Amino acid sequence: MAVLLAHEAEKGTAAMSDPVEKAQIIKLAEGLYVRQAVDNMGWIDMGEYAIVVDALEQVSLEGEVLDSIELTLGDKPVRYVINTHTHYDHVALNEAFQRKFSSEIINARTCSLPQDGREFTGNRKVRVFPSPGCHTNEDYCIWCCDDGVLFVGDIFGWGLIPLTRALNDKSAELLIATYERLAELDADTVVPGHGTICGTAELVRWVKYFRWLLKEVALHSQGKSGPVRPEKIALPEDMIGWWRFEQWKHADSVRRVIAAVEKGRLTI
Ligand SMILES: [Zn+2]
């Protein structure tokens, strides 16, 4: 059960404002914290040392982040910094951790992992494993099995199709297969790279949404000579509260599927 430590959204305005406008330190388990904001990061107490997951976009956050880690975990050395991938908004503080703790940086560029990943042990187990292809070819996930917490980086984007490469039959199948495999872990908490934290139910819901979207677009394009109009495909009501989904992510996903179908890349 997540415990909010700071900056709880003000009641009454919560529906209007962006829930991650202010960074919040959230305790997911004893010694396991997430700094939830537009860019997320986590830190994990392993007993003798700590692991950090992702390292934000702004180097100016160094002082604030180091203070938060010390406040919550004490002065344990951050022995490892794991990046879910190497986009600029996940690695900015790598250098700060290296400077302060001589941390080992673990990502697909510094450390190529076997398929079953690498396990870190201490007072809990943490496994980092490659899960490439959904967002980048470098995607790593971090599974804290004792706590039921899964860090997925930008594989889950609150309704966004996470691919940075083309959407086609092959990449669509890979997305669905990866989500289904991640859902099998049955994590209580899923930490995406950006925005509010969620759970396995959201991974499952997105697969259902994605399959529905593929079918809807196919249906609307049947027997039509002109292009499918994106506004014909309304967002599902139960997903209206998803982070930034109604604002732009649904429209973006619809446009992407329509483009892929019209170019003949997506036939499923
Ligand atoms: Zn990214």
Image (tube, rainbow, N blue to C red):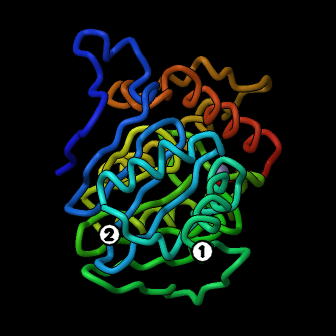
Instruction: Confirm or reject: label 1 Cβ below 8 Å from ligand 1.
Output: no
Residue at horizontal 71%, vertical 54%?
87
Near-viewer residue (136 or 173): 136
What x and y, as percent, mark residue 125?
A: 31, 81
Question: Residue at (44%, 70%) from the top-left corner?
Answer: 51
Residue 45 — which label?
A: 2
Which of label 1 and label 2 is nearer to you? 1
Q: Residue furthest left?
A: 1
Crowd around label 2: few <14 · some 14–19 · many ≥20 (10 Å): many
- The Cα atoms of the two marked residues, 1 and 2, are separated by 17 Å
Q: Secondary structure at mark 1?
A: loop
Q: Is residue 200 visible?
A: no
> Is residue 230 toward the left or the right of residue 119 in the image?
right
Q: Earlier in the sequence, mark 1 or mark 2?
A: 2
Measuring from the top left, give residue 235's x and y in whole percent.
Answer: 46, 25
Amino acid under label 2?
A: Asp
Q: Is residue 260 above or below residue 103?
A: above
What mark, if any, has residue 254 been given in the picture?
none
Q: Amino acid at mark 1?
A: Ser
* Disc 2: residue Cβ within 8 A of ligand 1's nearest atom: no
**Residue linked to disc 1:** 102
The answer to whether residue 262 is left or right of residue 41 is: right
Q: Are marks 1 and 2 in contact (CB under 8 Å)?
A: no
Report whether residue 65 is seen: yes
- Residue 19 % position (x, y): 39, 26
In the image, residue 70 above or below residue 23: below
Which quarter of the figure has residue 228?
top right
Residue 224 rendering spot, x and y as whole percentages? 72, 27
* Residue at (16, 51) in percent of width and height: 1
SS type, badge 2:
strand
Q: Residue at x 20, y 62 (%)?
A: 30
